[in-house]
Image (cartoon, helix red, strand yellow):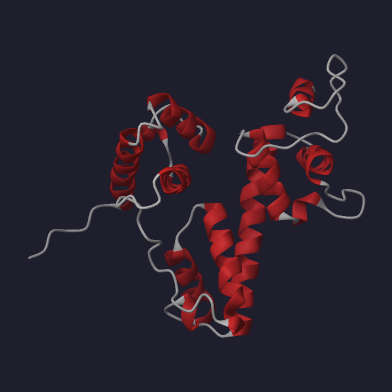
Amino acid sequence: MSAPAKPQHVREQQRLQILRAALIKTGKFDDEDYRNVLFVHGRAQSSKELDGHGRRQVIQHLESRLKAIDPKNPKIAPWKGRPRNMQVSDRQELQKIEALLADAGRDWSYADSLAKRMFKRDRVQLCAGHQLIGIVAALHNDAIRRLSAELQQLFGPGWDERGAIIASRLFGFDAMHRSFASYPAVMSQVLRWWRGELEAACAFPVDIEQPKCCLGCYQTAVARQP
């Protein structure tokens, strides 16, 4: 009789420690870097404090760091469940699905579950073109809900207005004619910049003491607002 499968949170914790050890072994990553990753991506002081979403976000980031430092490292796991027909010309929606899954820290099993629930298909790669469009829409709406919650927690009331201002100053977002809360890619950019994962220069610096543009000047100004 085969041993029962380990719970998902146990497997994720083990994966975290495997990646941490592999990164430290490269000599280009240390315990302080690891603690910073935990806080930035999971808002936690230790891996035991991470929830499911936080664990998956940290795992994704550690895998990306390891791939950048040592692309041939055997500890880099292939993305489980990735469809084999990603590059077929009429399956371009699969690439959109992959990008949305990556941003949410989810794997392909989540897309498969959507395919089964929405269209009675066991695997997302078995879906027709119009069905893939439906799954993209579902992931898009999920991204908006998730990012809206994170930004609201970060900025409080008026989070969409503050986010739109930041996006317009840093990423050229047209806040006058577009709704910030309808563009998850832009919402994600603002979050990543705030966490220090993405560098951008403010087009209209507001720090009077430093009239020349400096990274973080607008972030500081927003943080000081009541």
Write down the quadrant of residue 207 in the picture.
top right
Residue 18 coordinates in the image, percent (x, y): 29, 42
199 lies left or right of 70: right
- How many marks can you see? 0
Residue 29 coordinates in the image, percent (x, y): 40, 32
Is residue 110 something that shows in the picture? yes
Name the residue rendered at 51%, 70% in the picture.
114
32 over 172 or under it: above or below = above
Is residue 226 something that shows in the picture? no
Task: List the single residue furthest toward the right.
Answer: 176
139 lies left or right of 216: left
31 over 198 or under it: above or below = above
Task: List the single residue furthest toward the top.
Answer: 209
Q: Quadrant of the C terminus?
A: top right
Residue 129 coordinates in the image, percent (x, y): 60, 83
Name the residue rendered at 64%, 48% in the picture.
147
Write down the quadrant of residue 142 in the picture.
bottom right
Q: Quadrant of the N terminus?
A: bottom left
Name the residue rendered at 85%, 36% in the picture.
203
219 lies left or right of 208: left
Name the residue rendered at 91%, 55% in the picture.
177
